[in-house]
């Protein structure tokens, strides 16, 4: 039962990443501006932001933040960005779209506890690959 619960939480975290990835792409296309998906392994959070630059002053507007409970996230990319066409872009601090994102059961109140894991990959164009 414990393993099933761990697997469910890890898969839910991976699905949440996929949903936030899609939200970032859709937001970029809908608003015609760069949208960002940031991944923070230290705080176990993912956030979608859109660039609302006006008069040359950047002002990222946060649309959604998700904190992962009892699931650690690791990624070889920390900032994925999408242009107005919904394609991955490397402008500014943005990293290439071909990311490998891993999720692992790791409760915060249990140091050394590790369990099941799941990995998602994204293509250089920004498509989710399982």
Image (cartoon, rainbow, N blue to C red):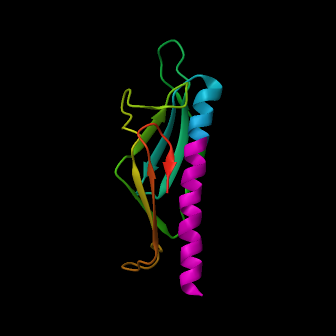
Residue 44: x and y in percent read 47, 59
Query: Is residue 109 among what the camera can see?
Result: yes
91 in the magenta segment = no
* Residue that extends furthest to the bottom in the rendered view of this protein: 1
Q: Is residue 69 above or below residue 51?
A: below
Query: Is residue 63 among what the camera can see?
Result: no
All told, the count of numbered labels is: 0
Magenta segment main secondary structure: helix
Q: Is residue 90 above or below residue 117?
A: above
The residue positioned 48% from the left and 23% from the top of the image is: 58
Residue 79: x and y in percent read 41, 41
Q: Which residues fall within the magenta stretch?
A: 1-22
The residue positioned 53% from the left and 46% from the top of the image is: 47
Residue 86: x and y in percent read 55, 31
20 in the magenta segment = yes
Answer left or right for 17 relative to 104. right
Residue 118: x and y in percent read 47, 66
Answer left or right for 28 relative to 118. right
* Residue that extends furthest to the top in the rendered view of this protein: 55
Q: Nearer the viewer, residue 54 or 86?
A: 86
Answer left or right for 18 relative to 75. right
Q: Quadrant of residue 102?
A: bottom left
**Where is the N terminus found, in terms of image quarters?**
bottom right
């Amino acid at each position: 039962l414990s393993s099933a619960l761990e697997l469910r939480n890890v898969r839910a975290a991976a699905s949440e990443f996929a949903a936030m990835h899609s939200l970032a792409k859709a937001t970029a296309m809908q608003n015609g501006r760069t949208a960002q998906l940031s991944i923070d392994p230290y705080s176990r959070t993912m956030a979608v932001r859109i660039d609302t630059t006006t008069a040359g002053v950047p002002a990222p507007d946060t649309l959604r933040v998700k904190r992962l409970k009892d699931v650690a996230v690791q990624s070889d990319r920390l900032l994925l960005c999408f242009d107005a066409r919904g394609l991955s872009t490397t402008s500014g601090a943005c990293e290439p779209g071909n990311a490998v994102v891993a999720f692992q059961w790791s409760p915060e109140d249990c140091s050394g506890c590790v369990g099941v894991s799941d990995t998602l990959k994204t293509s250089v164009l920004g498509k989710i690959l399982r």
